[in-house]
């Protein structure tokens, strides 16, 4: 007799999903009257420590970052600075401590001790959102300054700092009770605010931190817009290789492009745009004509040249669906500084879109404070496509461009229809934008209705 069997390796049991667990510490967690500068943390399994510089938060901030070593089941922390007397220290390791086998992180593992007789019990929490967009930037930090001077944020390191979680929330624990100035800023090495083009937020008044401190909401803004710089052309240092671009023969012709989408005119746009490659020094608006299919000029259209001298707008407020038009651009209408005109007169034949290519939109707000002057903002690819001031709790539009939109509500304090930034020097907070949590997909040839939208 003979037989065979499938040889299957043992499964090894269920996968380990548990993070490392602290068994004991020296000094023990939450110990008081600590004098040593060396701390040993012992876990229930072999551990690995990753990206400690990015993860570890020591409070209060020390002049030098402690060294962190690990071996087998132990993590050893050594302070380089002399510890302050009667001070509570906390070490938040973030996601740095993980088990060796599966990489399970002991998320936000925190060890606390005091050089005095008690553990400080001050706490303070809240939320941080971008004022202009209502979105979260979890790379920012919240800082607390003992020095209440307006210039401390620029000149000194804070006493405490903490990171945001993925929802834009923060929480300080084991803070020495007292009065602090609170700010939001990027997480740089110096922990000083050094760049006014970066996100920043402040509270108008100092806060008194205790074990029952009320939460706070911060709204970040950039006081100065970051302008894109132009790269340095020429030789790279040390390479001997020139990065100067190869000379390209200049195109002396005058060209232009138009704003049509495949020879179709959007019913929701009252203008046609012609964009030229060079500024126009000669321009005759009477030589650009909006006509019917028999080349008979229409009434009540207007042709203008903008301040850059490169963009021509043809404005018409009476588009009808699914109709044909001609746009005549005569050669004599324009010329550049070298008296170069377009190569020949053009006749651009186009059609208006059909209403069936759009959808109707009706939004009803169940909760909205009209006294805050709300402005509805429709957003695609982080760009505002339309802003509408709301005077009722309903937005109703017969035809609207289909697509997926984010919708924001701007609380327009000064009623100028646009978002306004803050100013720390003037203690002026930015206007606040609330981002609706859901995205809206408006379908073509469809009645898109949404009821009960709530805006806090």
Image (cartoon, rainbow, N blue to C red):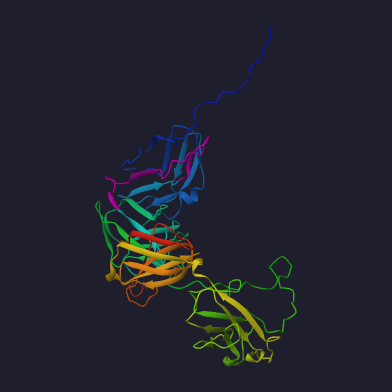
Residue in view at x 37 percent, y 68 percent: 396
Q: Residue 268: x and y, percent? A: 48, 74
Q: Is residue 411 left or right of residue 446?
A: left
Q: Residue 10: x and y, percent? A: 56, 23
Residue in view at x 40 percent, y 69 percent: 397
Q: Is residue 445 left or right of residue 126?
A: right
Q: Is residue 112 magenta?
A: yes
**Could you say which quadrant of the image residue 156 lies in?**
bottom left
Against 18, is 248 above or below? below
In front of the other: 288 or 384:
288
Residue range of the region highlighted in magenta in the rendering? 95-123
Q: Is residue 367 magenta?
A: no
**Could you say which quadrant of the image residue 387 lies in?**
bottom left
Against 77, is 319 above or below? below
Against 97, is 242 above or below? below
Furthest toward the front, the residue is 294
In front of the other: 210 or 417:
417
Quarter in which the C terminus is drawn? bottom left
Q: Is residue 152 visible?
A: no
Residue in view at x 52 percent, y 80 percent: 271
Q: Is residue 452 left or right of residue 157?
A: left
Please identify the dominant SS of the magenta region.
loop
Quarter in which the N terminus is drawn? top right
- Picture mark count: 0
Q: Residue 160: x and y, percent? A: 36, 56
Q: Is residue 106 visible?
A: yes
In front of the other: 334 or 139:
334
In front of the other: 127 or 455:
455
Q: Residue 89: x and y, percent? A: 35, 48
């Amino acid at each position: 007799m003979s037989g065979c069997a499938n040889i299957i390796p043992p499964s090894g049991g269920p996968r380990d999903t548990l993070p490392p667990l602290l068994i004991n510490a020296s000094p023990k967690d939450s110990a008081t009257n600590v004098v040593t500068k060396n701390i040993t943390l012992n876990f229930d399994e072999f551990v690995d420590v990753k990206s400690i510089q990015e993860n570890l938060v020591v409070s209060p901030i020390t002049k030098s970052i402690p060294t962190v070593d690990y071996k087998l089941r132990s993590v050893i922390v050594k302070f380089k600075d002399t510890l302050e007397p009667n001070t509570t220290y906390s070490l938040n390791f973030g996601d740095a401590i993980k088990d060796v086998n599966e990489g399970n992180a002991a998320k936000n593992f925190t060890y606390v001790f005091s050089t005095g007789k008690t553990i400080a019990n001050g706490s303070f929490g809240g939320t941080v959102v971008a004022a202009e967009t209502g979105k979260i930037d979890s790379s920012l930090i919240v800082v607390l300054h003992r020095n209440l001077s307006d210039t401390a944020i620029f000149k000194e390191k804070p006493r405490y700092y903490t990171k945001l979680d993925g929802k834009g929330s923060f929480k300080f624990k084991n803070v020495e009770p007292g009065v602090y100035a609170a700010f939001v800023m990027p997480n740089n090495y110096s922990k000083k605010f050094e760049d006014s083009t970066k996100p920043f937020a402040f509270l108008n008044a100092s806060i008194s931190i205790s074990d029952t401190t009320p939460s706070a909401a911060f709204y970040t803004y950039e006081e100065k817009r970051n302008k894109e710089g132009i790269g340095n052309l020429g030789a790279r240092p040390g390479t001997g290789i020139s990065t100067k671009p190869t000379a390209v023969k200049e195109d002396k012709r005058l060209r232009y492009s138009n704003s049509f989408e495949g020879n179709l005119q959007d019913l929701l746009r009252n203008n046609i745009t012609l964009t030229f490659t060079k500024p126009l020094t000669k321009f005759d608006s009477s030589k650009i004509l909006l006509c019917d299919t028999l080349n008979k000029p229409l009434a009540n259209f207007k042709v203008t040249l903008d301040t850059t001298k490169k963009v021509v707008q043809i404005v018409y407020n009476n588009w009808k669906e699914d109709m044909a038009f001609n746009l005549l651009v005569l050669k004599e209408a324009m010329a550049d500084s070298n008296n170069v005109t377009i190569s020949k007169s053009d006749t651009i034949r186009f059609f208006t879109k059909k209403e069936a290519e759009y959808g109707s939109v009706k939004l009803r707000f169940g909760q909205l404070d009209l006294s805050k002057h709300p402005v509805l903002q429709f957003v695609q690819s982080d760009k505002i496509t339309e802003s509408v001031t709301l005077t009722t709790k309903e937005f109703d539009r017969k035809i609207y461009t289909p697509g997926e939109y984010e919708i924001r509500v701007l609380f327009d304090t000064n009623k100028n229809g646009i978002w306004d930034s803050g100013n720390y020097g003037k203690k002026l907070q930015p206007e606040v934008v609330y981002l609706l949590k859901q995205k809206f997909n408006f379908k073509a040839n469809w009645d898109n209705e949404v009821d009960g939208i709530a805006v806090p």
